[in-house]
């Protein structure tokens, strides 16, 4: 991981894992049935481990961006836990019963893809041209 983030400037090293995670989550949403039908449970397990590892990488990256601007890492962790709690309740109590699992998974893949695209476009705009 690169040096501490400068306020107002995204770092490329923080953008690429976000874009990769969004892509993998999209694949994890769309491909399991085809992969399972062709190859069994091993590729799905590896994809789940890879998505989990990249998901675990998000908090350290967020703490490097958040801490210099707003202060406490503890407040970031509290926001992370509150968002996880609200997301789990909305996901299990409303989205799956109303829209079904496949449509809900596609919606969440699109929701995760949006910040990844914004981060990639922001980093591209900040890159000096040669």
Image (cartoon, grey):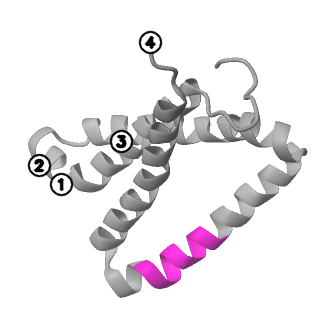
Mark 4 vs mark 3, foreground winner is: 4
Residue shown at the point (23%, 54%) measured from the top left? 30
Q: State the mark number for residue 24.
A: 3
* Residue 51 figure quarter: top left
Mark 4 vs 1: CB contact within 8 A = no
Under circle 3, the secondary element is helix
- Mark 2 and mark 4: Cα distance apart in space: 48 Å
Does label 4 or label 1 sit earlier along the sequence? 1
Mark 4 vs 3: CB contact within 8 A = no
**First to last magenta residue range:** 86-95
Magenta span has 75? no
Mark 3 vs mark 1, foreground winner is: 3
Residue shown at the point (75%, 29%) measured from the top left? 6
Q: State the mark number for residue 37.
A: 2
Expressed as whole percent of the image width and height from the top left, the position of residue 33 reads 18, 54
Locate residue 94 relative to residue 29 in the image: left or right.
right
Expressed as whole percent of the image width and height from the top left, the position of residue 72 reads 90, 45
Q: Kindly identify which residue carries mark 4.
A: 130
Mark 2 vs 1: CB contact within 8 A = yes
Crowd band around label 2 with a 10 angstrom C-alpha radius: few (<14), some (14–19), many (20+): few
Does label 3 or label 2 sit earlier along the sequence? 3
Nearest the eye: 125 or 74: 125
- Mark 4 and mark 1: Cα distance apart in space: 45 Å
Mark 4 vs mark 1, foreground winner is: 4
Does label 2 or label 4 sit earlier along the sequence? 2
Expressed as whole percent of the image width and height from the top left, the position of residue 123 reads 52, 33
Under circle 1, the secondary element is helix
Q: Residue furthest bottom?
A: 98
Q: State the mark number for residue 33.
A: 1
């Amino acid at each position: 991981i690169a040096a501490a983030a400068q306020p107002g400037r995204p770092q490329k090293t923080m953008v690429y894992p976000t874009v990769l995670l969004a892509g993998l989550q999209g694949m994890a949403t769309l491909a399991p049935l085809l992969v399972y039908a062709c190859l069994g449970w091993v590729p799905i397990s590896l994809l789940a481990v890879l998505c989990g590892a990249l998901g675990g990488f998000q908090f350290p990256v967020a703490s490097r961006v958040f801490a210099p601007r707003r202060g406490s890492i503890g407040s970031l962790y509290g926001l992370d836990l509150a968002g996880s709690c609200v997301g789990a309740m909305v996901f299990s109590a409303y989205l799956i019963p109303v829209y079904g699992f496949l449509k809900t998974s596609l919606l969440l893949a699109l929701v995760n893809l949006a910040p990844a695209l914004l981060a990639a476009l922001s980093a591209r705009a900040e890159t000096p041209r040669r």
